[in-house]
Every structure is written in structure tokens, then in C-alpha cells.
């Protein structure tokens, strides 16, 4: 190498620097765009509680409309107030979400954004001091939270403001002696409809006026072989909803159907569903949303029973369910689905086709969250080690001078060709294992061939210089290699310079830090 002119290397180096600058600019632009996307996504999520990516329907079937999109999930804080096995869910006009925690047997309250507020369970009743097996919840015309308890066989009312116990609903009816209310809902007139499963032979719907007087009752227990059999009979009715026309929709779970009645209980029709319906709700667009726990999904139908779309599917990831149970709507039509085995309430919304606006954060913690992706820039600095492409003559010079321990520093990385690594793999000097000290790396055959052709050097020289060019530093005692490397813009050190400029400086830095 020493007797070769460097003119060809200089020309090759000029071409590489030009290409290198273009590549670096391209990578820098790509990195900046990626970081901008990450920051924008974080700010978008902070403002809209959803990620700016389209949802993918996984429920199958023909889609007449685009399915709802997953927005965010509510699970509560960690610790004693964490949400476990949610079953019922209701949303108040005050934008508070009430969730029946089936495992802890309490009702938990959240803001509609998912911030935990309080829990309620204590009652004043001859049936016990607290809820025993709460099942479903709804918001009454009085603005309070009405909760069914299957074990206590009653309905209890709590304040939506602070969770304090208001009263026990005791209807003026003989049904209180045997009933076990499960689902409940109020119609537009303020009448309370309750699904009663207290008697094994009398699964039914019972209706009360605003004074607690029973005004209607219908149904008995039937198990059907065909969904059209025994209209008006039920087997574990689990959900009640109302259309704008006042029709009553009841999910007949074990019979795999939705039954439709007049407000007084006259049978109208049956809607066949694909699974076992639990919670149901009808939105402002007259779409019937049906929770199917065993398909781990929510199906959406027209009121005539035509399926139009669905969302969810089994799984643990965001937007997937594990035995969902109930569903409720907020004032803007977002769907809140209790995801029982995933210990959360998932929030879904219809795609608007409009990207919601990004509101700049107001609190310091929000700014920290939004700008956190910029911390990715620190990762290369944290992992930075000073690397040297290393030749055999440099290693031998360090061995001869007894300086191998100076190489054994975790902040230095000694890169060698794989061939040279194999020569030293069994070497141990001054308790330094060379198989741990050296880092054998392959070279690029394309780069080497290109270098040989355009710079006019031999292959062994091309291997060292292409690897050194990639790493940025070369440790060698060969003056010819050193000259060629400098022409390529590579920092070159020999044994003496390494010991004075790197090893000593590193020792001084460690001494100042006490390491």
C-alpha cells in the first residue's frame, strides 16, 4: 500500500463523500419526518384520546357502512381502585361513566375521558350493608345511577355526583317477593323496564311507572330450538333498549335473538342474531348495537334486523374483546363497551372522515408526554462506543508494549475482519480474552469490489479501508494504510496516539467520575 499513489483513492473518496452526504441528508430528513409523525401522533392522542390510524374490521360479513373505530380504553388507576371484571356500564348526561365492577362488587365512576372519580357500594337496606352481586346500571330520569343486584334481589339508587346512597327501589308490587332484577332501562316517558330472572320458570319483563307502580308484565321461561319459536318467551333476557317510536327491544340471550314489543308488551317481531346477545342499545341513527360475548364482538343492525356492520374480535390487544358484556352511549354517540376479561371499558366511535383538531397541551405533563418521542434521539448517545477498525500490526504493537489492558475498556470497540478474529480467538494476554475484546465483522463484497475497481488497490487493502470508512476510525501501524484512510476522511491512530489521545483521556475522565 505504501508504494501506491493515493490519487485514485482521493477520487474515489470524493465520490463516496458526495454519495454519503446525499444519503445522510436523506436519512436526516426521514428521521425528522418520523419524529414529527411521532410527536404529532402523541399530540393527537392527547387531544382526541385516540390514535390517528384507521380501524380494521375483523368481525367478517358484508359491510354496508364503515365500522366504528376504537378510540381509547378506560381501566381506572392501579391498586385497590383498579377496574376488574366490568359487566354493566352506563353514561350520564354529565359525561360521567359508571361501570359495574363485577369482581370488587362496586360501581366505579369515571369522567368520559377515563379519569377515575370514585366508587360506590355502601347501601342502607335490611338486605345488607353493601352491594353483593351488582349486574347492570342505567341512568334514571332523576339523573341518579340505578343498579341491579341479583344476590340481594333488588335495585339500588346512587348519586351520580358523589356516589352516595340515595335509596332502594321497592316497587308497589308483589313481584318483590320473588324477583331478581338483571337488566334495566328507562323509556322516554320515564317508565322503568326490568328484566326479571328471579323465578326459573318466569323469566319476564316487568314495567313500573315513575311512582313505582307495576303497569305491565309479560314473558315466561322458554328454550327454543328455532329462533321464531315461542314469541314472548325468554331465557335469560339481558338487555333492554327503546326505539324512537317507543318499541321495546329485549335481548333473549340463550335463545339467540332480539324480541321486539310494544310498550305494553304486545309482541311485534323477532330479530335473529348470530350469537348470544347481552347488552343492547339503539343510537340516534336508529342502529341497534348488540354485544355478543362469545364472538367477543359487537354487531350492529338496522331495526328491521339487517346486519350493517360490526367491530371487535377476540384478543388482548386494543380494539379486541374478551367476553364483552354491556354497552352504553354518551351524548355524542360514542359507544362504551364493558370488556370483562380484559378489565376495561373500550370506547368506540363512528368514523367522521374528518381529522379532529389538535389542541396544544396546556399542562407541563402534557407537553412532556407529547415531546417524549424526541427522547429517541438520545438512544444512540447512550449506546455510543468509540469504535476502531483494527489491523494486525496495531494489535501486535499493543501486545509488544504491554498495552493490551488499555484496550480492555467497555467504551472502546475493536473491530477486525472475521479472518483476523479467528487468529486471535484463543489468545489471552494479561487476563484479557481476545475473543471478548475483538469484534469480528464481515465486510461488504460489493463495496470491496467497487473500491478495488475504482481506487486501484488490492483486495486486502480495500477490505480494511472500506470497513474503516464505515466505522470512521482506523487503528494501524501501517503508514500506507494510514495515508489512504486519511484520504477517505477516516481518523487514524497508531499505538502511540491511541495511548496518549484516547486511553489517557479515558483514564482521566474515569478518575474524575470516580469510576
Image (cartoon, rainbow, N blue to C red):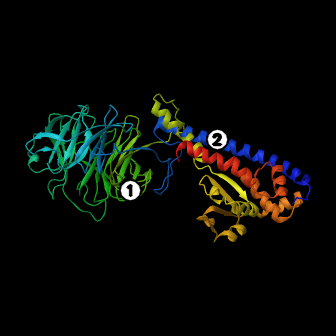
Query: In the rendered image, is residue 32 in sight?
Result: yes
Location of residue 89 (image quadrant) = top left
Going from N to C along the chain, the mark reached first, 1 or 2, is: 2
Q: Position of residue 13 (x, y in %)?
A: 84, 50
Mark 2 is surrounded, within 10 Å at the Cα level, by few (under 14), some (14 to 19) or many (20 or more) other residues, namely few
Q: Position of residue 263 (x, y in %)?
A: 25, 42
Q: In this view, does 426 lie to the left or right of 205?
A: right
Q: Where is residue 496 in the image (x, y as percent from the top left)?
A: 74, 52
Residue shown at the point (65%, 45%) measured from the top left? 505
Q: Is mark 1 on a helix, strand or loop?
A: loop
Up the image or down, 436 lies above or below 34; here it is below
Farthest-out residue, front: 401
Query: In the rendered image, is residue 170 in sight?
Result: no
Q: Nearer the viewer, residue 91 or 223?
A: 91
Q: Nearer the viewer, residue 170 or 209?
A: 170
Mark 1 is surrounded, within 10 Å at the Cα level, by few (under 14), some (14 to 19) or many (20 or more) other residues, namely many
Residue shown at the point (42%, 53%) measured from the top left? 320
Q: Nearer the viewer, residue 12 or 281?
A: 12
Give the number of the mark in front: 1 or 2: 2
- Residue 296: which disc? 1
Q: Position of residue 344 (x, y in %)?
A: 35, 48
Give the Cα separation between the discs numbered 1 and 2.
38 Å
Of the 4 image quadrants, the one containing the N terminus is bottom right
Up the image or down, 370 lies above or below 327; here it is above
Q: In this view, does 448 lie to the left or right of 280?
A: right
Q: Name the residue under label 2.
A: 33
Q: Is residue 146 left or right of residue 67?
A: left
Farthest-out residue, top: 362
Location of residue 330 (image quadrant) = top left
Amino acid at each position: 500500500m505504501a508504494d501506491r499513489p493515493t490519487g485514485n483513492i482521493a477520487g474515489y473518496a470524493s465520490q463516496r463523500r458526495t454519495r454519503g452526504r446525499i444519503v445522510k441528508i436523506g436519512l436526516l430528513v426521514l428521521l425528522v419526518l418520523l419524529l414529527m409523525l411521532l410527536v404529532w401522533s402523541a399530540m393527537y392522542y392527547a387531544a382526541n384520546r385516540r390514535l390517528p390510524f384507521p380501524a380494521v374490521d375483523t368481525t367478517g360479513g358484508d359491510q354496508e357502512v364503515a365500522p366504528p373505530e376504537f378510540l381509547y380504553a378506560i381501566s381506572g388507576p392501579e391498586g385497590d381502585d383498579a377496574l376488574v371484571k366490568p359487566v354493566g356500564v352506563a353514561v350520564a348526561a354529565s359525561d360521567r361513566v359508571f361501570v359495574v365492577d363485577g369482581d370488587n362488587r362496586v360501581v366505579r365512576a369515571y369522567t368520559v375521558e377515563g379519569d377515575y372519580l370514585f366508587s360506590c357500594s355502601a347501601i342502607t337496606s335490611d338486605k345488607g350493608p353493601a352491594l353483593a352481586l351488582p349486574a347492570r346500571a342505567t341512568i334514571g330520569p332523576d339523573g341518579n345511577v340505578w343498579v341491579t343486584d341479583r344476590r340481594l334481589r333488588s335495585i339500588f339508587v346512587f348519586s351520580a355526583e358523589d356516589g352516595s346512597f340515595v335509596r332502594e327501589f321497592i316497587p308497589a308490587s308483589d313481584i318483590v317477593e320473588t324477583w331478581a332484577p338483571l337488566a334495566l332501562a328507562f323509556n322516554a316517558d320515564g317508565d322503568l323496564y326490568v328484566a326479571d330472572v328471579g323465578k326459573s320458570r318466569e323469566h319476564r319483563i316487568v314495567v313500573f311507572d315513575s311512582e313505582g307502580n307495576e303497569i305491565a308484565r309479560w314473558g315466561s321461561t322458554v328454550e327454543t330450538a328455532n329462533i321464531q319459536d315461542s314469541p314472548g318467551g325468554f331465557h335469560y333476557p339481558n338487555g333492554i333498549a327503546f326505539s324512537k317510536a317507543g318499541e321495546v327491544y329485549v335481548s333473549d340471550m340463550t335463545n339467540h335473538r332480539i324480541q321486539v314489543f310494544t310498550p305494553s308488551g304486545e309482541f311485534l317481531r323477532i330479530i335473529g342474531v348470530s350469537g348470544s346477545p347481552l347488552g343492547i342499545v339503539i343510537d340516534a341513527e336508529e342502529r341497534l348495537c348488540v354485544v355478543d360475548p362469545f364472538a367477543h364482538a359487537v354487531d350492529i343492525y338496522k331495526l328491521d334486523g339487517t346486519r350493517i356492520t360490526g367491530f371487535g374480535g377476540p384478543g388482548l390487544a386494543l380494539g379486541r374483546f374478551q367476553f364483552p358484556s354491556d354497552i352504553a352511549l354518551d351524548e355524542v354517540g360514542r359507544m362504551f363497551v364493558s370488556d370483562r376479561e380484559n378489565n376495561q371499558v373500550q370506547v368506540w366511535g363512528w368514523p367522521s372522515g374528518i381529522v379532529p383538531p389538535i389542541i396544544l397541551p396546556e399542562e407541563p405533563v402534557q407537553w412532556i408526554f407529547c415531546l417524549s418521542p424526541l427522547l429517541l434521539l438520545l438512544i444512540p448517545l447512550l449506546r455510543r462506543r468509540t469504535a476502531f477498525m483494527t489491523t494486525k500490526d496495531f494489535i501486535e504493537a499493543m501486545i509488544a508494549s504491554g498495552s493490551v489492558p488499555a484496550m480492555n475498556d467497555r467504551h472502546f470497540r475493536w473491530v477486525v475482519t472475521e479472518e483476523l478474529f479467528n487468529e486471535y480467538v484463543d489468545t489471552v494476554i494479561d487476563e484479557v480474552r481476545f475473543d471478548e475484546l475483538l469484534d469480528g465483522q464481515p465486510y461488504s463484497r460489493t463495496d470491496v469490489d467497487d473500491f478495488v475497481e475504482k481506487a486501484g488497490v488490492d483486495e486486502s487493502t480495500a477490505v480494511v479501508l472500506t470497513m474503516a470508512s464505515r466505522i470512521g476510525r482506523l487503528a494501524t501501524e501501517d503508514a500506507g494504510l494510514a495515508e489512504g484512510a486519511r484520504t477517505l476522511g477516516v481518523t487514524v491512530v497508531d499505538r502511540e496516539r491511541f495511548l496518549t489521545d484516547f486511553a489517557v483521556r479515558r483514564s482521566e475522565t474515569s478518575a474524575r467520575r470516580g469510576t
